Image (spheres, rainbow, N blue to C red):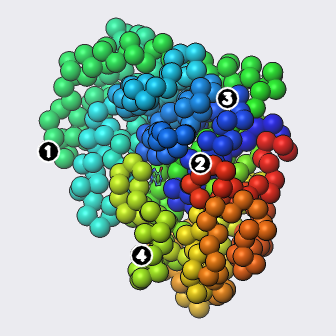
Amino acid sequence: MANVTVIGGQWGDEGKGKIVDWLASRAEVVARFQGGHNAGHTLVVGNETYKLSLLPSGIVRGTLSVIGNGVVLDPWAFRAEVERLRAQGVAVTPENLQVAETCPLILPFHRDLDALREDASGSGKIGTTRRGIGPAYEDKVGRRAIRVCDLAHLGELGAQLDRLCAHHDALRAGFGEPRIDRARLERDLGEIAGFVLPFARPVWITLNEARARGDRILFEGAQGVLLDVDHGTYPFVTSSNTIAGTAAGGTGLGPNAAGFVLGIVKAYTTRVGAGPFPTELDDAIGERLGERGREFGTVTGRKRRCGWFDAVLVRQSCAVAGVTGIALTKLDVLDGLEEIRICTAYRLGGETLGHLPAHAADQAAVEPIYEVMDGWPESTHGARSWAQLPAQAIKYIRRIEELIRCPVALVSTSPEREDTILVRDPFAD
Ligand code: IMP
């Protein structure tokens, strides 16, 4: 198992950035396989802070970085991110960054549609990042998408653009919006093509060759299992599969490429956007978690909803995503709480459930059943070994492992890379 796949085990924002950065420094290739620039990873290297949305985290350290076919690519956001990194002194070249030729493009009218739908949804809002992710994936499976390889064939796009524009013009008309300015779209595509095309490659070849050489590949997931379009809290989800299995299909490798599946899991729970959240806290403890955990979205700046650790959800995430071990993050945010609750089951209409029911109304109605544990007054901030953790914090971690039926591979105790307790090295397996 030379490869590692990192995925979020909750609703995203579990603190993947730090763990991915640490693992990326030991990988030969880092690959994104789903999502787009709705993701947000903050990397702190030395005195410099890098904010990544679309580019794989390896790019900051010069590791070969690959954007797989499962990603939806906004070419203008791509250019902006590359230029921002270059301005920070990072070398981004076609030598260290490759984009799958088959990536579908996010176009300006996808972004429009995302926002129009959200604004028209009232209380049914999903709370998307408004980046056009969902509409772009719709066009991919609707077989209407313009893909990266099309940028080299802009003169032959006529019929394809006719179909795509006809589809969107009908949707836009429903919202009272003007038709797509086709001339402008063609001009804009022509202008951006020159920037994107040098990075375009058959990345499945690059990755299969890397694998044959025995290179270590780190697959960098975005969002989290509970936002998976199949396994998440549908319809309050993103539009891709966020589970580890997508690492293969989203890059062009076989299903055994994923290797060690590391699920990143926060020691409590947060969510941005709308949708069910059984252990949400609307009280002073929720506020405290948000403040101490600095729970604001990297991409949209929105305040994250906070709640107790939900072992039912994480157990389900680990099962459906095939998690080998978890990285437990932000343990220090719980320091100083008198008591800590863990949700171990749900109550729904007189029944006790050990899993999240499928229907959105049931998901919204479940009541958490809590187990109460003593907190710890000591600080765990910056702990680098079990010996530096209070006994009660260790008890909390052990109880989580038991409830989610998955071992802890890492514990992260601060944003600093070194402040990590390594239990099992994912790359060593
Ligand atoms: P979309 O991916 O922009 O369509 O948004 C769909 C849902 O996924 C919304 O609830 C977003 O807040 C959520 N979401 C998308 N990307 C992320 C992420 O990187 N972290 C956390 N939530 C996300």
Q: Which residue is mark 3?
A: 29
Disc 1, SS = loop
Residue situated in front as seen by the camera: 158 or 25:
25
Cα distance in 3D space between marks 2 and 3: 17 Å
| Disc 4 crowd, CA 10 A, few/some/many (<14, 14-19, 20+) | some
Tell me which label, 4 or 1, sits earlier in the chain: 1
Question: Which percent across, then down, holds residue 57?
Answer: 56, 37
For marks 2 and 3 on the same chain, the one whose residue lies earlier in the sequence = 2
Viewer-nearest residue: 167 or 335: 335
Q: Name the residue type under label 1.
A: Gly
Label 1 or label 2, whichever comes before in sequence order: 2
Residue type (three-letter) at the residue carrying disc 3: Val
How many neighbours does mark 1 have within 10 angstroms: few (below 14), some (14-19), or many (20 or more)?
few
Nearer the viewer's eye, disc 2 or disc 3?
2
On screen, residue 325 above or below 197? below
Label 4 and label 3: CA atoms lie apart by: 39 Å
Separation of residues labelled 3 and 1 (CA atoms)? 46 Å
Q: Dot 3, how many residues are within 10 Å of its Cα: few (below 14), some (14-19), or many (20+)?
A: many
Name which residue type carries label 4: Glu
Q: Is residue 352 left or right of residue 114?
A: right
Tell me the number on the disc at residue 176.
1
Residue 43 lies, with reference to residue 69, above or below; the image says below
Cα distance between the residues tagged 4 and 2: 24 Å
**Which residue, given by chain and number where applicable, does mark 4 sit on?**
287
In terms of sequence position, does the residue under pointer 4 or pointer 2 come before the other?
Answer: 2
* Above-or-below relation of 10 to 132: below
